[in-house]
Every structure is written in structure tokens, then in C-alpha cells.
Image: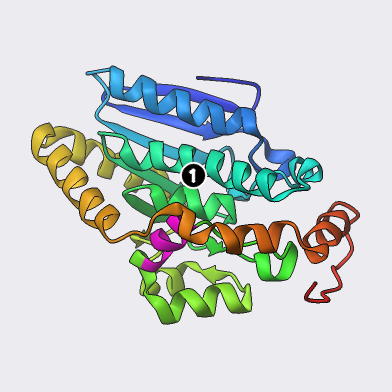
């Protein structure tokens, strides 16, 4: 599971996957997403592991989204749907992990990083954690139906619209009040609290923990629409002139100019 940009370790019943691309604030490449998939398979297959922790390599970022350079080859509606389907597959696999997951967050968890965090069972944060999906400001694309549903489950419709319409980031305390963060602790206590929480869960009845996790997942999944019902919206955003020019602007480090086309 360890790759050039991810590190997989275990300590007793707790496994940790560290996103290790600090020069890009851990922006996710497809190889990193694949490593996350492999980690989920390994954790499910290892009876000695009872909890998985996801974290960034330092406190500047948990994950700062998907590496935008990967969008340069996205041109058609089919490309857009394939991208979102591939991301949905990774996030769904993380959500379906049979063992509890904890996102240890200090720094930014934005875009794809926010989506990864939302798919975890708990999000334990330091005071400098920031959450958001600022695509209305950066790229002009949109969340898939499944990821929109995950955010809706956590924060409700009004806060979801506030977060996505304004493209602003929520600090740790606001994220806690909104339901995005599970717990906020002092920076110097973050690692200790994450470890203690993971070890507490690992010491409890594994069948009870697994049943609780899966029951909640099934209840949430039961309320979600079929993915195809959101395809027209994904295609409209990803094949727009705005999206194409915004990707170019992002990579050139200049602000996009929105036209609505």
C-alpha cells in the first residue's frame, strides 16, 4: 500500500495511511486514490487491524483536493462521467470498509480531500483544520450525486448550499457546529486523541462496531438517488467553456473569468 506518495503503517490494531505529497499539499493523483483502494482491501483482509486512520504527512494539509493537472485530458461528457464514476468508486469503497475509519485533520481538507473526510466515520481535527468544496470559485465543476448526498447527510440542505454557493472554507469550530468535524482538540493533543479514540474503538466488540457502521451506511444509501439522475448536471459543468478555461487558469495561477457558458 505504501507508494511514493502514500505511507501505510500499523501499530497494534490501528492502521494508518498517510498521504505524503507535501509539496502539493497532498493533492491526490490517481496512484494515490489507487493506494487508498488497496489500503481498504488490506485492512478488511487483516483480522489484526480494527481501525484505519487517514492523515496528511504534516499539518499544512489533510488533502487539498484532486491534482488539477489530471483534468487537462477531460473533454467530453463521457470523460466527465468516467472521472466522477472513478472517484465515486474510491469513495464508496472507503465508506464500505467494514472497520471504523478516522480522518485526522489539521490544515485543509478541501475538494476531494473533503470528500474523503466525509466518507470516514469520524473526523478528529486540530484548530487549523479547514473544510470546503470551493469548486464554484476554482473550477466550475460539481459534486456527484453520491458525494452531494454525503455532505447533505452531515450538514443539511441550507448549510450545503451555503458551503457550495459561496465556495468558502469552514474553520474547525464552524465545521464542528455544522457537523463536518466530529471533534476539535488542541494541536498538541491531536495525535494523542486520535490514537486514544482508535484504541478505544479497537478494544470494543468488533461485531457491534461493524454492525453499527454498516447499519448507518445502509440507511444513508437507501435515501440516495441513482447516480444517473445527476449525470446531466455533471456533463453540463465539466464540458463547459468555463470549466476548460478555469482548469487552464488554475494551472497558470490566475483567477478564472466566469461566463456561464
Query: Measuring 27% from the left and 24% from the top, which residue is drawn there?
Result: 49
Look at the image and say whether residue 150 sits in the magenta stretch: yes
Q: Position of residue 241 (x, y in %)?
A: 83, 63
Q: Quadrant of the C terminus?
A: bottom right
In which quadrant of the rendered view does residue 51 lie? Answer: top left
In which quadrant of the rendered view does residue 10 lie? Answer: top left
Residue 189 visible somewhere in the drawing: no
Horizontal placement of 49 versus 146: left or right? left
Q: Nearer the viewer, residue 15 or 127?
A: 15
Query: Measuring 87% from the left and 59% from the top, which residue is drawn there?
Result: 249
Horizontal placement of 34 versus 217: left or right? right
Whether residue 24 is situated above or below residue 235 in the rendered picture = above
Q: Which residue position holds label 1?
A: 88
Q: Position of residue 67 (x, y in %)?
A: 71, 43
Magenta stretch: give its range.
145-152
Horizontal placement of 28 versus 91: left or right? right
Amino acid at each position: 500500500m505504501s507508494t511514493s506518495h502514500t505511507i501505510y503503517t500499523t501499530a497494534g490494531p490501528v492502521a494508518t495511511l498517510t498521504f505524503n505529497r507535501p509539496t502539493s499539499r497532498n493533492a491526490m493523483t490517481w496512484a494515490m486514490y489507487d493506494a487508498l483502494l488497496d489500503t481498504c482491501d488490506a485492512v478488511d483482509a487483516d483480522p489484526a487491524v480494527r481501525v484505519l486512520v487517514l492523515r496528511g504527512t504534516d499539518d499544512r494539509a489533510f488533502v487539498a483536493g484532486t491534482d488539477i493537472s489530471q483534468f487537462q485530458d477531460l473533454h467530453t461528457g463521457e470523460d466527465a462521467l468516467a472521472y466522477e464514476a472513478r472517484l465515486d468508486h474510491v469513495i464508496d469503497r472507503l465508506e464500505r470498509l467494514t472497520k471504523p475509519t478516522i480522518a485526522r485533520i489539521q490544515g485543509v481538507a478541501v475538494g476531494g480531500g473533503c470528500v474523503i473526510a466525509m466518507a470516514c466515520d469520524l473526523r478528529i481535527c486540530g484548530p487549523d483544520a479547514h473544510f470546503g468544496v470551493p469548486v464554484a470559485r476554482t473550477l466550475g465543476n460539481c459534486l456527484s450525486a453520491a458525494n452531494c448526498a454525503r455532505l447533505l447527510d452531515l450538514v443539511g440542505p441550507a448549510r450545503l448550499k451555503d458551503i457550495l454557493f459561496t465556495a468558502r472554507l469552514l474553520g474547525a469550530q464552524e465545521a464542528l457546529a455544522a457537523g463536518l468535524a466530529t471533534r476539535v482538540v488542541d494541536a498538541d493533543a491531536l495525535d494523542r486523541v486520535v490514537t486514544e479514540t482508535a484504541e478505544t474503538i479497537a478494544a470494543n466488540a468488533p461485531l457491534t462496531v461493524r454492525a453499527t457502521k454498516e447499519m448507518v451506511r445502509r440507511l444513508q444509501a437507501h435515501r440516495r438517488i441513482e447516480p444517473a439522475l445527476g449525470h446531466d448536471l455533471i456533463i453540463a459543468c465539466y464540458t463547459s467553456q468555463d470549466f476548460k478555461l478555469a482548469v487552464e487558469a488554475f494551472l497558470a495561477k490566475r483567477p478564472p473569468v466566469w461566463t456561464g457558458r
